[in-house]
Amino acid sequence: MKSASLILALGLVGCAAPALRTPPAVLAPAAEITRFALEGRLQVRDAERSAAVGFDWQHDGPRDEWLFTGPLGQGLARIESDADGARMTLSDGRRFEAASAAELAASLLGVEAPFASLPRWITARPGASAEVRAVDAQGRPRTLVDQGWTIDYTDYTGEAADALPRKIDVQRGDTRLRLIVDAWNP
């Protein structure tokens, strides 16, 4: 009889204990997307400047190609980057070279942006250095912090767990970027 009472008491204590849950900020690592194409809009600003451009972005592993357009769709610049560095061609034909696409984009847009991290951020695939602070009901990142940048995923292309982001806000200090993806072409 004592053992039955003990089992019943332990069972009741077990029912009263709070359920162990994985913290919402823990994600199973998603496979990196190494190749994609997208069209969208980019707004950048800091305490002194702001810019808004359209963009077409082709990403294929270590190679990226960006075409930036103005508000009326006219071409502003093309930036290509790979393991050998980055090159920018402006609409008037002038060419510039730099070690990274971020350097060239900063000269074009007037605001420094984390271009090297954008392939992981735009696909909602946080790197090992990122701290995921919140996830949505499907387990996708809502907020993460990486290299001092806070990335907020405000909209996805659908409700599926593997849906890609549609709107992303990135900020560090006074620098803010908003990426709006109009079309994914994976």
Image (cartoon, helix red, strand yellow):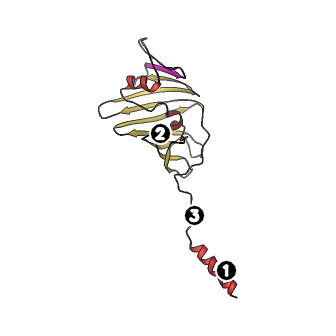
- The tag on residue 7 is 1
- Identify the secondary structure beneath mark 3: loop
Q: Residues within 10 Å of mark 3 (few under 14, many from 20)?
A: few
- The tag on residue 167 is 2
Marks 2/1: CA–CA distance: 53 Å
- Identify the secondary structure beneath mark 1: helix
Instruction: Tell which of 50 and 26 is nearer to you.
Output: 26
Marks 2/3: CA–CA distance: 33 Å
Residue visible at 56% across and 71% down in the picture: 17
Nearer the observer: mark 2 or 1; the answer is 1
Residue visible at 52% across and 54% down in the picture: 24
- Residue 79, magenta (yes or no): yes
| 54 displayed left or right of 36 | left
Image marks 2 and 1: residues in contact by CB distance under 8 Å: no
Kind of residue at badge 2: Lys
Of label 1 and label 3, which has the lower sequence position? 1
Residue visible at 33% across and 38% down in the picture: 174
Q: Which residues are magenta?
A: 72-90
Instruction: Tell which of 19 and 40 is nearer to you.
Output: 19
Give x and y (percent) for residue 126: 53, 41
Q: Residues within 10 Å of mark 1 (few under 14, many from 20)?
A: few
- The tag on residue 20 is 3
